[in-house]
Image (spheres, rainbow, N blue to C red):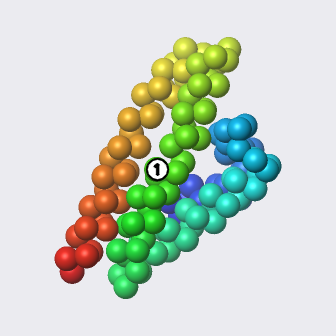
């Protein structure tokens, strides 16, 4: 998932630009590309057994870091003229971040035990 999403940040960056909270300094595209690099790096770390523990910890931090972007998207979509199913979907998507965070934490902890 991280590899695919990281790649999409470069192939189709516009939707990701829209997720960047406007309160952040700098250009949205810089955050989009930076988060794409981060996702690809974390995916690589998770794929290699020797760096899997590091990857789990980085994935945990990454999933926490992108949550404000998910909140921003939901806020904007709920206030927009988007169809109701998209608005509801964006709200329901927010709690789905929890299993990703827990999975990353599990990888980090299990790898620490060996």
**Is there any visible trace of residue 40 in the rendered image?**
yes
Residue with the mark numbered 1: 64
How many labels, in total?
1
Instruction: Please give the name of the residue rendered at 58% of the width and 19% of the height, measured from the top-left corner.
Output: 78
Q: Residue at x 46, y 50 (%)?
A: 64
Regarding mark 1 in the picture, which secondary structure is present there? helix
Quarter of the picture containing the C terminus is bottom left
Picture coordinates of residue 8 (x, y %)? 64, 55
85 up-or-down from 112: above or below: above
- Residue 98, by quadrant, is top left
**Vertical placement of 110 versus 4: above or below?**
below
Report the residue at 63% width, 60% height from top. 36
Name which quarter of the figure residue 30 lies in.
Answer: bottom right
Q: Position of residue 76 (x, y in %)?
A: 64, 25
Say if 65 sits above or below 79 in the image.
below
Residue 1 in sight in this render: no
């Amino acid at each position: 998932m991280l590899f695919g999403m990281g790649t999409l940040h470069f192939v189709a960056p516009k939707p990701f630009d829209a997720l960047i909270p406007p309160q952040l300094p700098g250009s949205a595209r810089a955050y989009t590309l930076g988060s794409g690099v981060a996702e690809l790096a974390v995916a690589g770390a998770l794929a290699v057994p020797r760096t899997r523990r590091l990857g789990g910890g980085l994935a945990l931090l990454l999933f926490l870091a992108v949550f404000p972007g998910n909140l921003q998207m939901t806020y904007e979509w709920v206030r927009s003229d988007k169809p109701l199913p998209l608005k509801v979907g964006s709200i329901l998507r927010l709690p789905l971040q929890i299993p990703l965070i827990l999975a990353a934490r599990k990888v980090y902890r299990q790898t620490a035990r060996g």
